[in-house]
Structure formats: C-alpha cells, structure tokens
Image (cartoon, helix red, strand yellow):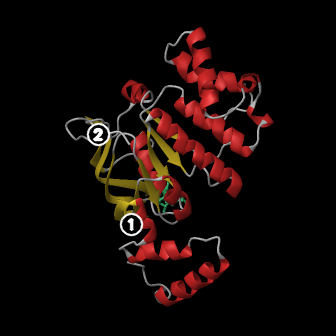
C-alpha cells in the first residue's frame, strides 16, 4: 500500500456527514454524521444491511446526494456538494463502478467507443485514446478484439470488466465500487474480486468498496467500516472487524454471512439464535 501524502492528509476524508432525503413533506435522515478516511492505495470496505446508508455515502462522495452538513475532502480539497465544471474535472481522479453491468453500459455502443468516450470528452487525441483503450482491456484481461463488439455479446462478468476498464481509462486515484460483484455468480465474483486486487497492486488506485457481504470485503479490503441505520458503528482493520468485531451488530452480520463448511454454518446458526434480540428490539 502506498503512503498518504507527506503531510499525512488522507486521499479521502469524510467528516461528520449528514444526508437527508425528502419524502413528500417529511425528511428522512439517511446518514447521521458519518466519518471515515481512505489512504492512497487503500481499500476500505463499507458493509451493512440493506438501507443502512452505504450507497448514500458513496453518492455523497460522488456529488450524487446532497450533503446537509459535514464535509468531504479529496486530496486535501473540500469537494462537499461540488457541482458543475469543477465536479466534472474531478472525474479524472474519482470514478465509480456500479452493481449492474447490464444497465451501466450503453448497448448500442461498441466497447471501444464506451472506453474512448471519457478520454475524447476530456480532449485526448484519437490515437492516444485508442492506445489507452487497448491498455485498459489488457488490464481487465479482455481480448483486444473486444473493441469492436457491443456489451450484449459479453457475459455478466465480462461486462463488469468492461465497466471497470471504463472507470480506469482516466487513471483515477479513487474508485467508488458500489456492490460491484453482487449481481454475479460466486465463481465470477471471485474472479472479479481478484481482478480488483490485481488492478490495485498494478496502479495504486484506492477503493471505497460497498458491499452487504462480509465474505466479499474480507477478501479485498484493508480496513472495514460497518454501517447501521445511517451510522458508522465500527471501523477497523479487516482481520479485526470481519473475525473478532466489537459491535453487537457486526457480530450479527458475521454470524449471518454464509460459510462453505456446513458444520461451521450450523454452529454459527446456533450462536445467531442465542444472540438474537427479542423481536422488534434494535440491535445496538
Ligand atoms: N432518493 C432517495 N429518496 C428517499 N430515500 C432514499 C433515497 N435513496 C435512499 N433512500 C433511503 O435512504 C436509506 C439508505 O439507503 P441506501 O441506498 O444508502 O442504503 P444501502 O445500505 O446502500 O442499501 P442497499 O444495500 O439496499 O443499496 C434507505 O432507507 C433508503 O430507503
């Protein structure tokens, strides 16, 4: 892992961020003062059950959710609610890979066009764009002739590789990965996670890796933050949080995550039933 900037500034600093969504006449607080950091070359996992606020945090960093209070700094610069041209310029450094490799790629464009578009839009010449596209296809282990084919001709795992290549073309420093493997079968998941790990080793890019699956973040992340009802209830090194967590909610998540060994799975189920709070009681 690369060190942070010399003065110790993390690549991303999220400080006490609150996000409110309007729901008709009422307001729903999706993030209740969340703080976290990501260093250069670091992968930080964000886990938690559905609705805990994981994607909202990713969207706040990307400028897709309005921050009510708190701040987000990227490389020491305040990017909270940054809009317009300044936000677009940030796309060179800050990219996203979404869950759905089917919906996130234009089916009418060739892979070459999909990958070249962010480059030519940023003023890169055609020849240089073509060379970068070839390099990125190689990075994500897709054949060179993929450039002439459309997304519909590829499997789900291959489409996610195309989406990763598109996120990489401008050589970003941070990629928000929002459930990037949860639409894939287990074997394909493992291959795509290995690819994320290889890319990080080769490029030094940082990841904010959003997943509901502790098994996934255990394989790839250096540190893990656990979200529960809009709050970050625990943050720590991967080994600690995913094997010996402090917070009761994280322990519930751990016991609920499937393991390959049926005997261990049955033992976990027994523990889970013992730990389970009475119906309707919040787990904190
Ligand atoms: N645009 C929106 N308007 C209103 N409420 C929203 C909006 N987006 C998200 N929410 C609510 O905010 C809360 C957090 O949602 P978020 O998508 O961040 O959770 P999550 O942990 O990513 O869940 P999932 O894993 O299901 O995507 C949920 O209660 C959700 O219903």
Q: Is residue 259 above or below residue 118?
A: below
Q: Is mark 2 within 8 Å of ligand 1?
A: no
Q: Secondary structure at mark 1?
A: helix
Left or right of 107? Residue 137 is left
Residue 240 image label: 1
Residue 146 position in % (x across, y down): 73, 27
**Residue occupying the point 42% across, 30% down:** 93
Picture quarter containing residue 105?
top right
Residue 242 position in % (x across, y down): 45, 66
**Which one is earlier in the sequence, the residue at label 1 or at label 2?**
2
In this rendered view, identify the residue nearer to me: 108 or 48.
48
Q: Is residue 65 visible?
A: no
**Residue occupying the point 42% across, 80% down:** 282
In this rendered view, identify the residue nearer to me: 244 or 153.
244
**Residue occupying the point 65% across, 52% down:** 189
Q: Secondary structure at mark 2?
A: loop
User: What whole-number distance in Å separates the C-alpha atoms at marks 1 and 2?
Assistant: 22 Å
**Residue occupying the point 64% across, 28% down:** 137
Mark 1 crowd level (few <14, some 14–19, many ≥20, 10 Å Cα): few
Residue 249 position in % (x across, y down): 42, 74
Left or right of 59? Residue 247 is left
Left or right of 144? Residue 123 is left
Q: Is residue 4 above or below residue 244?
A: above
In this rendered view, identify the residue nearer to me: 281 or 27.
281
Q: Which residue is mark 2?
A: 4
- Quadrant where the C terminus lies? bottom left
Mark 2 crowd level (few <14, some 14–19, many ≥20, 10 Å Cα): some
Return the residue found at the far left: 7
Say if mark 1 contacts mark 2, CB within 8 Å.
no
Q: Is residue 155 visible?
A: yes
Residue 219 position in % (x across, y down): 52, 56
Picture quarter containing residue 90?
top left
């Amino acid at each position: 892992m690369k060190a942070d900037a010399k003065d110790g500034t993390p690549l991303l600093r999220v400080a006490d961020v609150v996000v409110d969504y309007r729901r008709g006449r009422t307001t729903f607080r999706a993030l209740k003062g969340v703080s976290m950091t990501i260093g250069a070359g670091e992968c930080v996992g964000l886990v938690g059950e559905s609705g805990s606020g994981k994607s909202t945090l990713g969207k706040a960093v990307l400028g897709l959710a309005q921050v009510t209070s708190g701040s987000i700094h990227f490389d020491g610069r305040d990017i909270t609610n940054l809009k317009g041209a300044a936000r677009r310029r940030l796309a060179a450094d800050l990219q996203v890979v979404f869950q759905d490799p089917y919906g996130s790629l234009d089916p009418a464009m060739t892979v070459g066009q999909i990958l070249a578009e962010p480059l030519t839009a940023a003023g890169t010449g055609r020849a240089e764009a073509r060379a970068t596209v070839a390099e990125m296809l190689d990075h994500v282990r897709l054949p060179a002739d993929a450039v002439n084919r459309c997304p519909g001709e590829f499997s789900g795992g291959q489409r996610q590789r195309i989406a990763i290549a598109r996120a990489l073309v401008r050589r970003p420093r941070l990629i928000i990965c929002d459930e990037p493997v949860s639409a894939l079968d287990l074997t394909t998941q493992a291959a795509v996670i290995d690819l994320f790990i290889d890319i990080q080793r080769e490029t030094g890019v940082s990841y904010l890796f959003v997943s509901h699956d502790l098994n996934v973040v255990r394989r790839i992340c250096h540190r893990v933050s656990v979200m529960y009802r809009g709050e970050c209830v625990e943050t720590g090194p991967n080994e600690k949080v995913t094997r010996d967590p402090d917070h009761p909610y994280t322990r519930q998540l751990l016991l609920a995550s499937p393991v390959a060994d049926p005997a261990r799975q049955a033992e976990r189920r027994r523990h889970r039933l013992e730990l389970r709070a009475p119906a309707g009681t919040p787990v904190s």
